[in-house]
Amino acid sequence: MCDYCTVKLIARERDRILQRSARFIGLGSTAVAVVCFSVPGVVPLMTLLLVLPLFGILALSLYWVGVNRSLSWVGLGILSGLCILVVVYLSEGDTVSPSLGTAIVPLAAGALASFAVVLTVSVVRLVTLVLAFVVTVVLAELAIPGNVGMQDAQILLGWMLATIFGYWLSASIPRAGRRIHSIGRAHRAERQASETEAQRRQGARLLHDTVLATLTLLAHSGVGVAASALQQQAGEDARLLRQLRLGATPVPQSSGSYTLEPVEETALGTTLESVKQRFGRMGLEVSWHGTGQVLLPSDVLDAFLLALAECLENVRRHAGVTDAHVTITDDESTVRAMVTDAGVGFVLSDIDEARLGFKDSVVARLSEVGGNVRLFSSPGAGTTVVLEVPK
């Protein structure tokens, strides 16, 4: 989102909160004032009948202030409240009810002061606020000649609280909005960086599982691999690179074999055979044990097969044997593959942490789908790798 759009959105949200706050405070104070005016003996019956419609206009104005930013509703509400004070002043007799001050304070210090909440965001509104406050104090003094000091203090306090509250909201909401926008922008940048890194890792795995494996065979003059198998593998790599150059997104089906056709759910047994055939062409005889009739989601299946193929590739290149055993088992929640060879073995602590083949193409790949890897080996006793993925 552009900065200009963000500023407009924050300003709109600020105005919405100010308007609703003014409506809530004003309607509550208006209701209290109406109740106080309705108490018998506070004002004459005729005066009460005259001010009730004005209270209705005041409440209507406060309601629309909550949904409309127009200054006209603020002006109408303040005018109706001041008219109530004028009617009380003009209709008072020789004696003034001692409860009249209690009735006027909720009106002057509450209902009218609530408009100050929305009058703190511009110079014009601030001028309106000052004028409304002055006129309210003057009319309240005229309506109740006695006990002016206490009444003025209460009205002043109400207007001050409403003004401070409105100013605090109008200042803090944009500041909070800018901080939220800044945090959101940082989050988007971090997410983009994470996605870029994930794409880089996926590209590295793709390259490692296909082209680099073929180039390694070529570098070793294809020792142990028939020329036809090497030619077929190179052809598959060439087709994959051509698809990538045309902008396609490959979906891995097995180590060294990618397709552009998405697979929602695939039986494990239908894909293990392709892995066996691929390594059979390269001189590694793979013996399968256990079940192959397990359904896995496509992303879990992809990670499982690619990690399995990478383990077999390590056997072919490093174990010094021509056969390996793969045992597939499963329970209610997990599918396991145990890759075993009787090769030369190695010391686990001697594994280079930076090796892409095991750390990234096996361990990290399964971790991303909720799986894990266990490795067992010792010099002269062969190697066993246990791969586990959730169903």
Image (tube, rainbow, N blue to C red):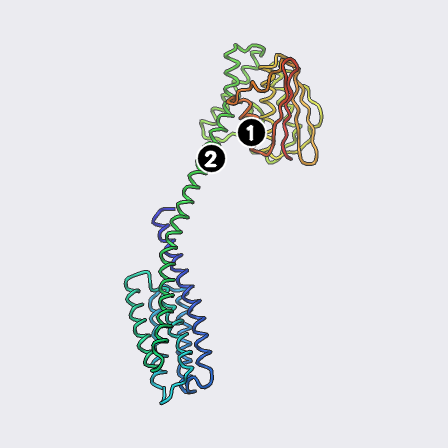
Q: 360 or 208, which lies in front? A: 360
* Secondary structure state at the residue bearing disc 2: helix
The residue singled out by tag 1 in the image is: 365
The residue singled out by tag 2 in the image is: 195
Relative to 366, does residue 351 appear above or below in the rendering?
A: above
Residue 379 badge: none
Mark 2 crowdedness (10 Å alpha carbons): few <14, some 14-19, many ≥20: few
Relative to 316, does residue 95 appear above or below in the rendering?
A: below
- Taking the spot 30% from the left edge, 61% from the top edge, the residue there is 122
| Residue 280: x %, y % from top left | 63, 16
Relative to 200, does residue 54 appear above or below in the rendering?
A: below
Q: Which residue occupies the extreme right position in the image?
A: 290
Report how far apart the C-alphas of labels 2 and 1 lie in the structure. Answer: 15 Å
Left or right of 232, for residue 119: left
Count of labels in the image: 2
- Taking the spot 45% from the left edge, 71% from the top edge, the residue there is 28
- The residue type indicated by label 1 comes to Arg
The answer to whether residue 73 of the structure is visible from this angle is no
